[in-house]
């Protein structure tokens, strides 16, 4: 019965099973623990993972969400307590994508924690040792992946909330071998790109004007770099130029300020986005956020820093000078406390004319005179369920950039011009099953177009190839699991 309540009231329950409450649950998990949910593989289980996987009671597993707990939302290393995130994400898979709850599997890879407070907490449930590093770490993830795909060759593994170095390393290591994706890098990027394209439309400009938007990304981690990569790919396609030639409009900051080529010890993942000082006249290496905003007057300020409140009054007021007729503020960090600003502050200081989006939900803002400042939730929940479901029902063995791009484009085109004019960039969470069906169909059709769709169950690749767009959406919807409960009292 619970699942039906969840599906029917997803807008009310998403903030509980998902961000922000799931963050609080993870922070207090060891103290709240009653019973295990999902599977835990510890560094001590090395050599045993295959038999452990074969001992999981379900015959078939379709969707796995895997974490090592090293970067849980914006809350840092929560070790084994991060299991709340795979559980919450999979609850969303059941509610939004209709994945059968008996075929989901939340997984924690417990390779230790570097969180001193947890190591000293007598209730802490995980391994009391520093995190494994290097080859030792990778050998654990390798063993897990081999075991999963040996037993369930058609499963999909979503990597979630891994610290940046492992997010990128594992994505490169596995994406051509296994059916997997990294939600923070790839799911977030697709949702952000759809929102960025929406802000172009909100200014009453054609989509092709995306190539002229000045976009400042604050946070050079797995999510921020994922967004930049995908946005640059999109601009490169639109402008018909190579990626190196279209980076000028993007500016990247991390905890040490504006990233330029003058930076010493630059992270290799951020290096491709470092600015030449001659291209940012008047700015210096490490320029602060306020300096950057005042100088550049960007169209978009997008935060994926994990730092609550860094879009402060001064920064938001500086956005009033934006070159855009409708400046966009995306405070995408989670949970609510870690959002770069609140919705109320954004409308108060940056002006009523802005487009606003946040990673965790805020109420719409009453601007007086009957006017409403619309709050969008720019969260990867709009895409990951459809990416997982579309891939599953296509039978593809890998998840390609083209499939992810199709997901993002589908979300971007979901909204009408009328909605976009009102500053509404994403659909209501209440429509999440419908959105997921559309996104899933887009992903499936992209897999078909690439010749990767091997079919699912009785539906072979030929049938998938011959489905129209509408038939694909119908096929996806038909395959969504839905709870049907036997009545406890039979009517006479
Ligand atoms: N809305 C959504 O769908 C998603 C939101 N997120 C959120 O994004 C945040 C970051 O996630 P990751 O990129 O994976 O983390 P990360 O730890 O890989 O990266 C954080 C980045 O922020 C930078 N940073 C820290 N303090 C800063 C400051 N004061 N000014 C500017 N930059 C600063 C760091 O230098 C680093 O580059 C988290 O809060 C997470 O919850 C992540 C994925 C999806
Ligand atoms: C939404 C999400 O995946 C994150 O904040 O990490
Ligand atoms: Mg995440």
Image (spheres, grey):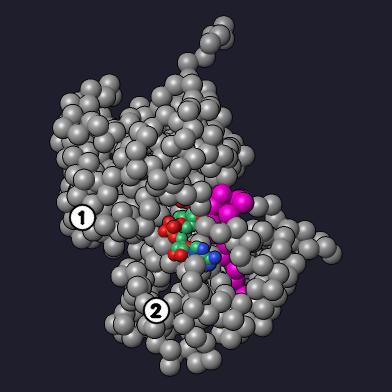
Location of residue 491 in the rendering, given as x and y in whole percent from the top left corner: 57, 10
Per the image, label 1 sits on a secondary structure element best described as helix
Does 105 sit above or below residue 209?
above
Tag shown at residue 133: none
Q: Using the rendered view, name the quadrant where residue 311 is placed.
A: bottom right
Left or right, residue 4 beside residue 99: right
Ranked by sequence position, the earlier of labels 1 and 2 is 1
Does 348 appear in magenta? no
Tag shown at residue 263: 2
Nearer to me, 240 or 275 = 275
Q: Disc 2 beta carbon < 8 A from ligand 1?
A: no
Location of residue 282 in the rendering, given as x and y in whole percent from the top left corner: 53, 91
- Can residue 154 be seen from the camera position used here? no
Location of residue 474 in the rendering, given as x and y in whole percent from the top left corner: 38, 45
Does 6 sit above or below residue 58?
below
Q: Residues within 10 Å of mark 2 (few under 14, many from 20)?
A: some
Q: Disc 1 beta carbon < 8 A from ligand 1?
A: no
Q: Which residue is mark 1?
A: 173
Location of residue 211 in the rendering, given as x and y in whole percent from the top left corner: 44, 82
- Can residue 42 be seen from the camera position used here? yes
Does 330 appear in magenta? yes
Left or right, residue 119 beside residue 376: left
Per the image, label 2 sits on a secondary structure element best described as loop
Left or right, residue 344 beside residue 123: right
State the extent of the magenta-drawn residues as a range. Answer: 327-338
Residue at 33% x, 86% y is 245
Residue at 83% x, 63% y is 368
Left or right, residue 323 beside residue 401: right
Q: Using the rendered view, name the quadrant where residue 126 is placed.
A: top left
Residue at 22% x, 26% y is 52
Q: CA distance from mark 1 to mark 2?
A: 28 Å
């Amino acid at each position: 019965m619970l699942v039906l309540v969840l599906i029917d009231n997803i807008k009310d329950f998403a903030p509980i099973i998902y961000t922000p409450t799931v963050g609080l649950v993870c922070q207090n998990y060891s103290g709240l623990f009653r019973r295990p949910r999902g599977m835990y593989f510890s560094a001590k289980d090395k050599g045993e993972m295959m038999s452990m996987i074969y001992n999981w009671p379900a015959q078939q597993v379709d969707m796995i969400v895997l974490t090592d707990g090293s970067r849980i939302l914006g809350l840092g290393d929560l070790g084994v307590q991060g299991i709340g995130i795979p559980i919450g994400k999979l609850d969303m898979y059941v509610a939004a994508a209709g994945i059968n709850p008996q075929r989901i599997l939340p997984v924690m890879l417990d390779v230790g924690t570097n969180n001193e407070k947890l190591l000293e907490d007598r209730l802490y449930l995980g391994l009391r040792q520093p995190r494994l590093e290097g080859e030792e770490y990778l050998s654990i993830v390798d063993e897990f992946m081999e075991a999963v795909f040996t037993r369930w060759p058609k499963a999909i593994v979503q990597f979630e909330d891994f610290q940046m170095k492992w997010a990128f390393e594992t994505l490169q290591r596995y994406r051509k071998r296994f059916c997997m994706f990294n939600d923070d890098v790839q799911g977030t990027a697709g949702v952000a790109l759809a929102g960025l394209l929406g802000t172009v439309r909100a200014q009453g400009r054609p989509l092709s004007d995306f190539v002229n938007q000045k976009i400042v990304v604050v946070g050079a981690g797995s999510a921020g770099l994922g967004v930049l990569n995908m946005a640059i790919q999109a601009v490169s396609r639109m402008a018909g130029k190579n990626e190196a030639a279209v980076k000028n409009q993007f500016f990247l900051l991390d905890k040490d300020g504006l990233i330029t080529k003058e930076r010493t010890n630059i992270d290799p993942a951020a290096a491709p986005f470092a600015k030449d000082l001659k291209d940012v006249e008047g700015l210096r290496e490490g320029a602060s956020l306020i300096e950057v905003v005042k100088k550049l007057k960007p169209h978009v300020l997008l935060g994926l820093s994990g730092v609550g409140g860094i879009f402060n009054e001064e920064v938001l007021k500086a956005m009033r000078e934006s070159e855009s007729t409708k400046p966009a503020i995306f405070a995408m960090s989670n949970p609510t406390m870690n959002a770069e600003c609140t919705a109320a502050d954004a409308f108060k200081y940056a002006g009523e004319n802005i487009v606003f989006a946040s990673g965790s939900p805020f109420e719409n803002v009453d601007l007086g005179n009957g006017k409403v400042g619309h709050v969008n939730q720019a969260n990867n929940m709009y895409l990951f369920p459809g990416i997982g479901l579309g891939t599953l029902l296509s039978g593809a063995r890998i998840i390609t950039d083209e499939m992810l791009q199709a997901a993002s484009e589908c979300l971007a085109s979901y909204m009408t011009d009328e909605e976009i004019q009102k500053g509404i960039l994403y659909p209501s969470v209440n429509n999440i099953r419908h959105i997921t069906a559309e996104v899933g169909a887009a992903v499936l059709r992209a897999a078909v177009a690439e010749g990767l769709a091997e079919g699912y169950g009785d539906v072979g690749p030929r049938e998938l190839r011959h489905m129209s767009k509408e038939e694909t959406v119908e096929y996806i919807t038909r395959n969504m699991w839905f709870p049907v409960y036997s009545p406890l009292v039979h009517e006479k």
